[in-house]
């Protein structure tokens, strides 16, 4: 595991685009029959990576050829976004997503944001694995890598599980289900939180938080 560098920036966005191509929320942002759909999704993730900050992105690399196999985007406690850096990608995001896509993003955030912890915490914005590398433990390795640091710091963590399968996976890592969403663009999603390993504290209460994309 290593931090994302500028030289792998475009490759990481491409991997995320492939990983989320079949995601139901992404399908509402960029329809399945949209022209140049993969490029449009990748454009959205380029903006997301810049907005979050490359220093907050973990990547898993292939032992064979060094290619990017998986990407995890984290917002650390008291995260300060990088809107100026992200503005480089904004014209293309607006062009590629259109009014419908932007409405979907705002609708998702309005449904999910109020249910994340009030206390400072790490937030898993997105985690995506190259479809060709799925089933090889890449996602688990990415989670293990960051959660070690989170536990050492004694910090809380949160994420949004977008399917029953991802919810079960995150439960194995100590995340507990909080609010379940049953309607709208985020229907079927579960907001989850995690106290650091070794802590006996209850899951944190929730409040509004700044966000900029979907699901963990």
Image (cartoon, rainbow, N blue to C red):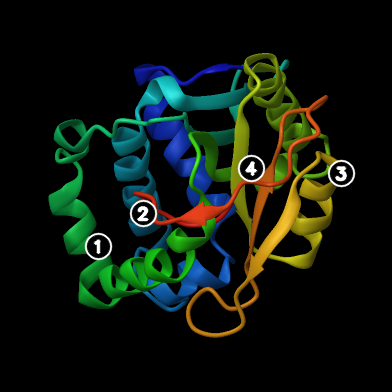
Q: Earlier in the sequence, mark 4 or mark 1?
A: 1
Instruction: State left or right for residue 105 relative to residue 199.
Output: left
- Asked if residue 30 shows in the view, the reply is no
Q: Quadrant of residue 78?
A: top left
Which residue is depicted at the point 58% across and 52% down? 205
Crowd around label 2: few <14 · some 14–19 · many ≥20 (10 Å) = some
Mark 4 to mark 1 CA distance (whole Å):
22 Å
Q: Can you give x and y, in whole percent of width and height, for residue 76 in the image?
A: 47, 29
Q: Secondary structure at mark 1?
A: helix
The tag on residue 39 is 2
Q: Quadrant of residue 129?
A: top right
CB atoms of marks 4 and 1 within 8 Å: no
CB atoms of marks 3 and 4 within 8 Å: no
The tag on residue 96 is 1
Q: Earlier in the sequence, mark 1 or mark 2?
A: 2
CB atoms of marks 2 and 4 within 8 Å: no
Q: Can you give x and y, in whole percent of width and height, for residue 202 in the image?
A: 73, 44
Which residue lies under the disc numbered 3? Answer: 172
Which residue is depicted at the point 31% across and 71% down? 101
Which residue is depicted at the point 19% across and 38% down? 83
Mark 1 to mark 2 CA distance (whole Å):
8 Å
Q: Secondary structure at mark 4?
A: loop
Q: Secondary structure at mark 2?
A: helix
Which residue is depicted at the point 43% across and 57% down? 38
Instruction: State left or right for residue 88 relative to residue 172.
Output: left
């Amino acid at each position: 595991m290593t931090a994302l560098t500028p030289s792998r920036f475009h490759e990481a966005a491409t991997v995320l685009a492939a990983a989320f191509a079949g995601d139901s929320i992404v399908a509402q942002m960029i329809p399945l029959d949209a022209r140049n759909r993969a490029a449009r999704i990748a454009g959205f993730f380029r903006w997301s990576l810049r907005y979050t900050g490359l220093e907050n992105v973990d990547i898993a690399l292939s032992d064979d050829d060094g290619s990017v196999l998986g990407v995890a985007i984290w917002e650390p406690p008291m995260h300060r976004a990088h809107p100026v850096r992200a503005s480089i990608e904004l014209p293309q995001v607006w062009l590629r997503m259109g009014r419908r896509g932007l409405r979907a993003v705002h609708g998702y955030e309005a449904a999910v944001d109020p249910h994340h912890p009030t206390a400072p915490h790490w937030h898993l914005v997105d985690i995506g694995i190259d479809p060709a590398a799925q089933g090889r433990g890449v996602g688990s390795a990415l989670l293990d890598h960051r959660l070690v640091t989170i536990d050492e710091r004694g910090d809380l963590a949160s994420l949004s599980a977008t399917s029953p399968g991802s919810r079960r996976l995150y439960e194995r890592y100590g995340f507990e289900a909080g609010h379940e969403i049953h309607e709208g663009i985020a229907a079927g999603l579960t907001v989850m939180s995690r106290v650091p390993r070794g802590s006996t504290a209850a899951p944190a209460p929730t409040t509004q938080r700044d966000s900029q994309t979907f699901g963990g």
